[in-house]
Image: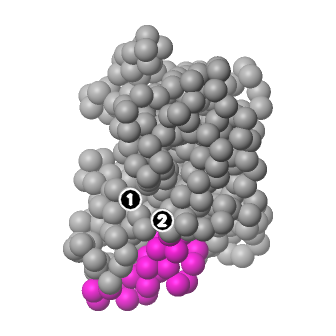
Amino acid sequence: MTVSAQPRPASSDARLDDAANAASWSALGTYVELRIADPLAVPETAAPQPGLLAAAVELASSVLDEVDATCSRFRPDSDLMRANRAAGQWVGISPVLAGALRAALWAARTTGGLVDPCLGELLVAAGYDRTFTMLSSLDSRPAAVPTVPDPDAWRRIELIEDAVRVPVGAALDLGAVGKGYAADLVALTVREQLGCAVVVSVGGDVRAATGLDHEGPAWPVDIAVDRVALQDPAQVCRVPLTSGALTTSSITARRWVRGGRAWHHVIDPRTGAPTDGRWRAATAYDLSAAAANSISTAALVLGDQAWDWLVERDHAARLVGPGREVLTTPAWDDWLEQERAR
């Protein structure tokens, strides 16, 4: 899927490294990192094609702007927030939000509701009512957490090509698939419009796409429980990624206190409370970042049951426990062996 990415100036805070065909900037309240492989360059002998990186950043920035304008829970003018305010009524929405909702509903069905797109009201009540960079880690306001969310509310979301009807009493939040969906859109748009292989990380959700010639490098991807841990080589696992996606869900990064209670953003929809912390982080590989994120999120929600759930469904996943112990599923080991053999 692509979006209506119109030419626009590259993100004003983008740092471009033309020699490495790499760029980084901020969007969607998080960090973005992008690399491309110039289809016209001969490896190790030819200089990168002039302007290709800037064009890729322009496209990526346009995609992310459109995702923000349509899917953000922190913008009152977004399509998602208009739909939330008009719960019970049909609301016209953009193709971008419609695609994100299809991904979210797929995730809910696939995980049996463990990844729930109807937790918006609960997250706001718990204090997560703005982008995390603007959220105070210590908040003296009392929590106003509602009762346990309706586990079947997501089943009553009605979605057609250009409109959605949110069930009364529910509020949409795309946190579990939103960044991954954005990474998917960026990678596919850059690949389709520029023809080059690309890898993009949106807040740690990584999506790689080969060029139109189906060729591409094995991008090195560093995995850790959070960005702080990435600075410690002892906590980093480096893996190659040619195509598909790697996402890491963690309970260590987005944490805050509200009403005297510690919160993090991975909520168990069965209880309405943060997950119990059996795993500090879960990383998953899948063909799309939205799918991988649903798997890694579900693993954290399941806690002690995660391993059996992942293995039974043949998911490629890596779990990190509180003592830094690491478990990898057989599907993860098989995928990594294939990537390293390329």
Q: Residue at x 72, y 20 (%)?
A: 234
Residue wearing tag 1: 2
Total number of numbered labels?
2
In what element is the residue under mark 1? Answer: loop
Q: Nearer the viewer, residue 159 or 22?
A: 22
Inspect the image, locate mark 1, and give the three-letter code of the amino acid beneath it: Thr
Q: Are marks 2 and 1 in contact (CB under 8 Å)?
A: yes
- Quick one: label 2, few (<14), some, or many (20+) residues within 10 Å? some
Q: In which quarter of the view is residue 20 placed?
A: top right
Q: Residue at x 37, y 33 (%)?
A: 213
State the image coordinates of residue 311 (x, y, percent, origin top left).
32, 26
In what element is the residue under mark 2? Answer: loop
Q: Which residues are magenta?
A: 66-91
Q: Is residue 143 visible?
A: yes
* Quarter in which the C terminus is drawn: top left
- The residues tagged by marks 2 and 1 sit, at their Cα atoms, a distance apart of 8 Å
Q: Residue furthest top?
A: 341
Residue wearing tag 2: 5
Q: Residue at x 66, y 66 (%)?
A: 9
State the image coordinates of residue 324 (x, y, percent, origin top left).
64, 25
Q: Nearer the viewer, residue 311 or 4?
A: 4
Q: Residue at x 54, y 58 (%)?
A: 59
- Figure check: 198 above or below 183: above
- Figure check: 58 above or below 40: below
Looking at the image, residue 260 sits to the left or right of residue 84; the answer is right
Inspect the image, locate mark 2, and give the three-letter code of the amino acid beneath it: Ala
